[in-house]
Amino acid sequence: MGDKSEKIAQLRALLNTPGVMGGAQFRAVADERDAARARGDFEVTNVMPGEVIGESDNGFYLVRQDFPLAWEHGCVPLGSALAADARHVAMSANDDELHGFDPRKTVFIDTETTGLMGGAGTVLFLVGVGYFTQDAFRLDQCFMRDYDDEGPMLAFLDGLFKNADTLVSYNGKTFDLPLLRTRFIQNRVPFRLDGAMHYDLVHAARRFWKKRLGDCSLGSVERNVLSLQRHGDVNGADIPTLWLQYLRTRDARPLVPVFYHHKMDILSLVSLTGLLSQKLSQSAGEGFEHHEDRLSLLRLHVKRKEWETAAALAEKLLDALDDEKLMCECLELAVVATKRTKDWERMETYSVRIIEQFPNHTQARIEYAKHLEHKRRNLPEAIRICREGLELQNSRQALGYSPAILGLRELATRMARMEKKLDKALERLDDETTAADDVATNGEADKSGTTDSNATPDLES
Amino acid sequence: MNVAQTIDALRGDREFTQNLSGWHVVPARDARYGAWPAGLDARLVAGMKKRGVPQPYVHQAQAVEAALAGENVCVVTPTASGKTLCYNVPVLQRLLSNPNGRALYLVPTKALSQDQMHELQSLIDGLEVKIGTYTFDGDTPNSARRAIKSAGHIVVTNPDMLHTGILPHHTTWIRLFENLQFIVIDELHHYRGVFGSHLANIIRRLKRICAFYGSKPQFICCSATIANPQEMAQKIIEAPVRLVNDNGAPSGERHFLFYNPPVVNRELGIRRPVVREVERIAKYFLSKDIQTIVFARSRLRVELLATYIKEAVKKTGKNPEMVKGYRGGYLPTERREIEKGLREGKIMTVVSTNALELGIDIGGLDVCIMTGYPGNVASTWQQAGRAGRRNSISMSILVASSAALDQYIIGHPEYFLGQTPENATVDPNNLMIMMSHVKSAAFELPFLDGEAFGLDAASTEEMLRFLEEKNVLRHVKDKWHWSEQTYPAEEISLRTAAPGNVVILDTTKDGRVIGEVDLFSAPTEVYENAIYIHQSEQYTIDRLDLDDRKAYARPVETDYYTDAQTKADLKVIEVFQDDRRGGADIRHGELSVTMLPTMYKKIKLGTLENVGWGEIHLPETTMHTTAYWLEYPEDVALRCGLSQDDLGGALNALANALRQVAPVQVLCDVTDIRAHADLKSTFSERPSIVLYETYPGGVGFSEKLFTHHQRLLESAVSLLSDCGCKEGCPSCVGPALETGQHGKSGALNLARIALGLDVIVPAGEKREAV
């Protein structure tokens, strides 16, 4: 009996805790909520500021917001995208078509969907299009209150796309754009964006920041590059369910964070475009504070075969670097670049540096030996480089490393070949010297040309 | 010695011929030619001449003509009769005149799609026109997919890929759907039962999407010999079909032998093991340098036979590499090598599962030996069709195992030869199957009010409403939209009827999925210690997790298989058809079946002896399905001169026999149907025998059994009368110990009563059967 009254006392105490309700009260609250929903109190029209475009039963819901150009989103203002240089855009995308990039003819796009796997039945219930107007950045968030809003929404989007020749997205090439195209096809509306240029920032982001950040999702790039913190965001994987539930409850309150999330995604596209161009405007990558990012830029220049720029950047970067691993890759890229610009002096300096700093870098030795042999015709030096490498690797092999990994075979064969070549050349030199002596002894004036025994014989065989 | 001489030698071999129940000769046949239809592109005609086809056989001419005239065609001719030309020619003709045209080829397996491609490609190369043909399946790399979607004129794929990879992504296949001219379905007979019912619904979705894009493709189907190819084709494509079955291809003289291993134990009805018999016969042909293919029904048997024969070859000092095993589980490179070796004559004997039954080009061999009856007539003809080159003599030998069905067939060679192949069944309107596809279809294109899928608009709307109640669809204005965030096609297996299957995982291969079973069938098929067979390979089930829908399996090699015993509780929900034949009522209708597995038997392969048992501890499951059943009058025991106990045994015996011979009438596997007998059934309180389908909703087997009831019972009577055992054996009614002393004779009488015949009592007197 004592037990029972104890229990009752416990329950009574619980009821006094804020937020805890008894059954009847809870029921009442729930009923009131259901009634409010049925009245439409929480419809999107009452929860998000916007307007119905078209008729109530033949339209869609538009949430439009104009941002001043000075609006800071992250560490740069939105207007920075207006100053984005098309050359930077093209380079960061490694897509020369984007040389025609004009921010005033560009749409920044992101979508929220009912499924993360695509397919003909996935619906884009929230499509955001951002674009610059005369003196602002306008964000149009187009929202489907139900499935039949799709037609009018696509017609409206078609109008927005009319004036654009470029679209900017994050991972849009694999996700958003095919889905958008699918919606247009399903509704039999022609899809203009097929002919447009596409700046998909995820690829640019990976090129610069994958090495340093690892995770190049928009969220990660936002935090680490744009220095932006979101407040009250929603988990992307939950979004599809939220809309599907809204259809049944007509309660748009859980969708508010979805609109926020979506808006932030698009604003980030704008800031990123501006910021990236700013960073790229300094030729030697000084726009990037982190060395890894500058190295990534160097890598991109090499990939794009921009040898002069790469060489110049490499030189500056090498001065700044102190991390060994970065240094090694930087030197490798520097060698590649200077080889192409035929700047042999610099190339040799870099090659020697690699070999000195990273004596186990067999590949570098092989490359340098090749260069010495064919371009400098300096066989003895080439052979010395190889021999040194072989000796080093032999001792490593003794410690248990596999010869294949150490590149021993190639070093050895190359060296053997060169030694043979050198021997042959020295033989020839001997013969010629003897012949010259004979001539001199015979008192004939130098008819057979001088042989300078100090010069490296011309050993083209 | 050549084939003809060997055959003569065999005829004189008494030891061999005394085990034969039939030796049938089909005389050689000359080719019968037709003419290409007028207007066929000259390049095509020239191209085919180059490939050794100056003029078409009659069936090829008919098929091509009908297809180009706009009809749907179904070609039913044996293997190696040039069926592929029947569809390649019309397709290429259309593409030549319309460079934007497209065609879709549906092929059951990947290996076959490779073959199709080669065939097509060589024909196209001869035309010197740019026509792109590609396979599109799970192995197609992403980089190739875009090209195929936009530029592939002929896309070769399989039903699974169509179901999950193409239809749900139709917006990326616009070029294909807008211009689709032909859909080719090869090996149509393969799509029976559940698989066929799924295919019919996939075709419905496909046609729906074509209508959206404005195309109306024609169908060209190819089938092996079944009793009702036209019916099958029309059920699957839901449109009229022109049947072309006048085979004009030539063939050499063909010998069919029916061989029954001799009995070694009369009491128990045990015969010499089929594997050793086949081994002897195969060795004989090998010693005569005659190229032979041996078919076996399990991987174990394939490996055993290949090993035995190889060892024998080694002993004679010849190269054992000329004997090879073959099955679907081998790597593609290995299989290509063996196929090549066969074509080039380097491999003299190949032992294979039915993997080599379907079309892969291996040239023609001289002799085919079948280890056990392949299960149905169509497969038997396919396998036998592997023997026979263009104009030379060939031989096929069916060696029976102890299974009841085998014994029935071997006892009735005339059944086999006399044009009564089984009826294939599909039921596209099985509710569960159709519902799965309604979901997929809604994902692909929203349903419109008034639209009909399979059935009429009202029935379709009922289904849509049901799905809306489950929040799967949402009805807005006049459209029904997909309203979930998942992807319907992924959850639907085309091999089972109900969603929510139990997947079977191979624990030795990182949990790779090797198969699926219906949730309902799981307790009786994948219980712990069950032997599960997949593509002729054996696995044992270590653990079954019903909640998680997973069964964990491990490869094994055993000489037995397992058979679960269940307690079943049946309730009649609705009777569709009702008749009284002879002395029993026969019915066809819907039942609710509650199954509780109790134990399992271990049954030795080959001899079918009972070699052990085990318990099953699993909950009961309930499902609705269709069934065919017999109800006897209450005094039937008296009429047969049996006690009540004996009547129980006799009912079980007959039920077992009927289940074993059902495949003779209806193209099904023995596992597609279960038998149940009751002295006092719960629904009628009378002695009854029920044959119910193991797929929820049923796929049409019961209806066929009802329709062919007469023949079904006659086959059972035949089986029982001809069986040499005294009181029952595994080859007819099941072991005598289980069916009782008078099990066999009682079963015979029950069958006779149902047929309206006189009863035979032990004393030899006859009694009236009224």
Image: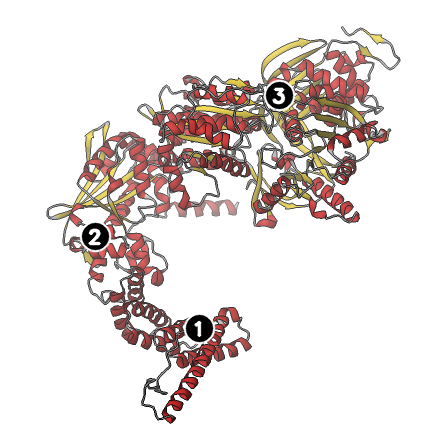
**Quick one: SS at disc 1?**
helix
Q: In which quarter of the image is residue A144?
A: top left
Q: Is residue B467 among the parts visible in the rendering?
A: yes
Q: What amino acid type is highlighted by mark number 3?
A: Lys
Alpha-carbon distance for marks 2 and 1?
40 Å
**Quick one: SS at disc 2?**
helix
Q: Which colour scheme is used?
A: secondary structure
Vertical order, B236 against A86 (above or below): above
Q: Quadrant of residue A176?
A: top left
Task: Using residue B150 as the reference point, say whether residue B112 is left or right of it.
Answer: right
Q: What amino acid type is highlighted by mark number 1?
A: Thr
Q: Is residue B438 among the parts visible in the rendering?
A: no
Q: Which of A47 and A58 is in front in this view?
A: A58
The chain containing the residue under callout 1 comes to: A
**Quarter placement of the N terminus of chain B:** top right
- Circles 3 and 1, Cβ within 8 Å, touching? The answer is no
Which of discs 3 and 2 lies nearer the camera? The answer is 2
Residue sitting at the far right:
B763
Q: Which residue matches tag 2? A: A99
Task: Using residue A76 as the reference point, say whether residue B230 is left or right of it.
Answer: right
Task: Using residue B661 as the reference point, say whether residue A190 is left or right of it.
Answer: left
Mark 1: few, some, or many residues within 10 Å (few <14, many ≥20)? many
The circle on residue B571 is 3
The residue sitting at 48% across, 43% down in the picture is: B139
**Quarter placement of the C terminus of chain B:** top right
Q: Which residue matches tag 1? A: A362
Q: Where is residue A431 in the image (x, y as percent from the top left)?
A: 43, 85
Q: What amino acid type is highlighted by mark number 2?
A: His
- Circles 3 and 2, Cβ within 8 Å, touching? The answer is no
